[in-house]
Amino acid sequence: MPHRIRRLLCAGCVVVILSGSGRAGFGEAGKGVSSRTAADYVHAVIEANRTIYAGYIVDRLEKTTSLRATERWEEEDALLLPAQFLKKSSEISARAPTGMQYRLLSLWPINPENGPRSEEERAALESVSANPAQPFTRVTRISGKSYFRAVYPDVANNDTCVSCHNHHPKSPRTDFKKGEVMGAILIDLPLPAASGDRESAEPLFPPDVIADYIRNILQADRTLYAKQIVERLQTRGKIRASQYWWAENGLPLPAQYLLSVARRVDQQNLGMGFRLISLWPINPQNGPADEFEVKGLDALSTHPQAPYTERTDSAGVAYFRAVYPDVAVTSSCVECHNGHAESPRTDFKLNDVMGGISITLQIR
């Protein structure tokens, strides 16, 4: 659990309303997540990953090593461009049957696929460009179904993004500056069936559904980073992932990468966060923080198909918590844990549950 939320829950008496392996019920307690808050939670995870990848990976390594991000990243043994990383991540996330979708948009796209696909999307881009502090939101229809749509500004937060767009031969605009809005991140969340098409209503999403969305994004980012950044580039002798990645001009280990994303999310103070946990952590700080996380990890070791969940109240604030399995997705993950001098367990195999992702959401 993120430190700020953990402190909140420890400040008063924590009462477990519902816990167990499998789906949390919804409706009997009248608790959920508003559509705008749900979109804010999802966007926070997408934005944090985009910021960490663009800054800690692409921008830092281009300045300190010979490794570059290129459009032809596979052929050139290079890093994915930040826009490519987000696109690939969204494609992996979309494989899960949640219906949630996200993608990049721009009024000045290098890739025409990232341009607005409707007048509504163009209006959304113009809105967030003129007023970046206020996301564009509305209920929209896609293939006969209702979605809550939220569009957030995508800001140039490092030199590499600005330089790439300003010098690309296909860029429609070449005068971007750091800190400017370059485009947007569009998020579509399927509305609960009972909400209908009422734009004035703000339906409550079941918290387990929003936790699923967050977990799918994190799983997609972790899988993409572990396979296409760490394992691919290590195998081809381009760079190494290291526990001391900053000092050694290397890649963060996949767990370190995701923990950096978690810290970025926690800084936004939204009432949502996540952390990596394990019964066999190399870093003792990644052990379970409380009885719920211990029980969650125990449950996942025998029933990894469903998250372990609970609802809690602390000082009048309601939270939903879930622990999802964290699976060894590459051989490099297995080799790192099995070969590390401080690893409490050294017999992991590919696709084993190595730990969990603990997600906490404030609900109402």
Image (cartoon, rainbow, N blue to C red):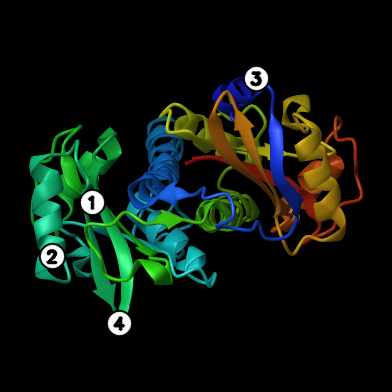
Q: Residue at x 42, y 39 (%)?
A: 48
User: Which residue extends farthest top?
Assistant: 11
Q: Closer to the N terminus: mark 2 or mark 3? A: 3
Quarter of the rendering occupied by the N terminus: top right
Q: Horizontally, is 270 left or right of 198 in the view?
A: right
Q: Crowdedness of circle 4 by 10 Å Cα count: few (<14), some, many (20+)?
A: few
SS for dot 3 = loop
Residue 305 image point, x, y percent: 74, 64
Give the percent coordinates (x, y) of residue 85: 42, 55
Residue indicated by mark 4: 144
Marks 2 and 3: CB-CB under 8 Å? Answer: no
Q: What crowding class fits label 2: few (fewer than 14 Cα within 10 Å), some (14-19), or many (20 or more)?
A: few
Assess whether mark 1 and mark 3 are in contact (beta carbons under 8 angstroms): no
Which numbered marker is on residue 158?
none
Q: Amino acid at mark 3?
A: Gly
| Type of amino acid under label 1 | Ala
Could you classify mark 3 by the number of other residues whose Cα lies within 10 Å: few (under 14), some (14-19), or many (20 or more)? few
Residue at position x 37%, y 36% in the image: 59
- Residue beneath disc 2: 120
3 and 4 marks in contact (CB < 8 Å): no
Of the residues tagged 3 and 1, which is closer to the observer? 3
- Does dot 4 land on a helix, a strand or a loop? loop
Q: Quadrant of residue 239?
A: top right
Tell which tag, 2 or 3, sits nearer the viewer: 3
Name the residue tied to disc 3: 12
| Of residues 66 and 351, the one drawn nearer to the viewer in this rendering | 351
**Quarter occupied by residue 253:** top right
